[in-house]
């Protein structure tokens, strides 16, 4: 049961809170130990071994979004041969942790109003918030907001084939072309 004002803190179930499991919650030393165990003494590690490192650090499968984000950053920092040295790997993980910390700080503003009077006045006047809901909250607050939460997602994945011309529009186009209208 949600209490008034606490829904901005995110989902109440910790298993649904995806942003809690980012690389920012781990120490850099954990990544160093995982790199050393995966490299087995080699100075560099192939990029395709990065999922194994994440499985060691996460003690299981990492969240898919986080795995893709880490793999993309490592692939960008890797040498042309497709391997990454230990120091470059740790620098990359440190940069990812900083980026996630900045994103979490921007997302963690639980209070959007300085007082209840301001909130009541804005609701009475039907004033829109200064920022969009997708920037204020990490996840939609209601189930009905899930559809269309991200603008780049196709709506429900259905393909539309609109009818471009029907008999009436062809007739109207012929009338206009003939100069009647």
Image (cartoon, grey):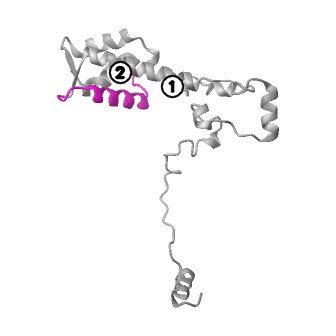
Describe the element under mark 2 as helix, strand or loop.
Answer: helix
Number of other residues with Cα within 10 Å of mark 1, as a class: few under 14, some 14 to 19, many 20 or more:
few
Q: Position of residue 116 (x, y in %)?
A: 80, 26
Residue beneath the point at 50% across and 72% down: 164
The residue nearer to you, when weighing 105 against 181, is: 181
Q: Position of residue 1 (x, y in %)?
A: 72, 27
Q: Is residue 159 above or below residue 114?
A: below
Q: Is residue 152 above or below residue 74?
A: below
Q: Is residue 80 above or below residue 29?
A: below
Q: Position of residue 174 (x, y in %)?
A: 52, 87
Q: Is residue 140 magenta?
A: no
Q: Which disc is residue 4 wearing?
A: none
Residue beneath the point at 57% across and 42% down: 149
User: In which quarter of the view is residue 168 placed?
Assistant: bottom right
Describe the element under mark 1 as helix, strand or loop.
Answer: helix
75 to the left or right of 107? left
The residue nearer to you, when weighing 50 against 61, is: 50
For the stretch drawn in magenta, the main secondary structure is helix
Q: Is residue 61 above or below residue 121?
A: above
Numbered range of the magenta stretch: 60-81
What residue is disc 1 on?
103
What residue is disc 2 on?
54
Residue beneath the point at 67% across and 28% down: 7
The residue nearer to you, when weighing 103 against 36, is: 103
67 to the left or right of 151? left
Q: Position of residue 30 (x, y in %)?
A: 37, 11
User: In which quarter of the view is residue 11 placed?
Assistant: top right
141 to the left or right of 60? right
Quadrant including the C terminus = bottom right
Q: Is residue 59 visible?
A: no
User: In which quarter of the view is residue 92 placed?
Assistant: top left
Number of other residues with Cα within 10 Å of mark 2, as a class: few under 14, some 14 to 19, many 20 or more:
many
């Amino acid at each position: 049961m949600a209490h008034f004002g606490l829904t901005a803190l995110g989902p109440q179930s910790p298993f649904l809170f995806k942003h809690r499991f980012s690389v920012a919650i781990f120490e850099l030393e954990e990544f160093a130990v995982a790199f050393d165990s995966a490299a087995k003494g080699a100075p560099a590690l192939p990029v395709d071994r990065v999922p194994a490192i994440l499985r060691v650090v996460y003690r299981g499968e990492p969240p898919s979004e986080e795995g893709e984000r880490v793999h993309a950053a490592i692939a960008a920092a890797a040498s042309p041969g497709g391997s990454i040295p230990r120091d470059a790997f740790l620098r990359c993980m440190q940069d990812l942790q900083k980026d996630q910390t900045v994103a979490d700080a921007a997302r963690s503003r639980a209070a959007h109003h300085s007082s209840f009077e301001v909130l009541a006045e804005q609701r009475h006047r039907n004033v829109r918030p200064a920022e969009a809901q997708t920037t204020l909250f990490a996840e939609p607050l209601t189930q009905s907001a899930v559809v269309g939460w991200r603008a780049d997602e196709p709506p429900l994945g259905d393909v539309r084939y609109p009818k471009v011309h029907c008999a009436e529009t062809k007739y109207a186009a012929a009338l206009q072309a003939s100069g009647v209208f």
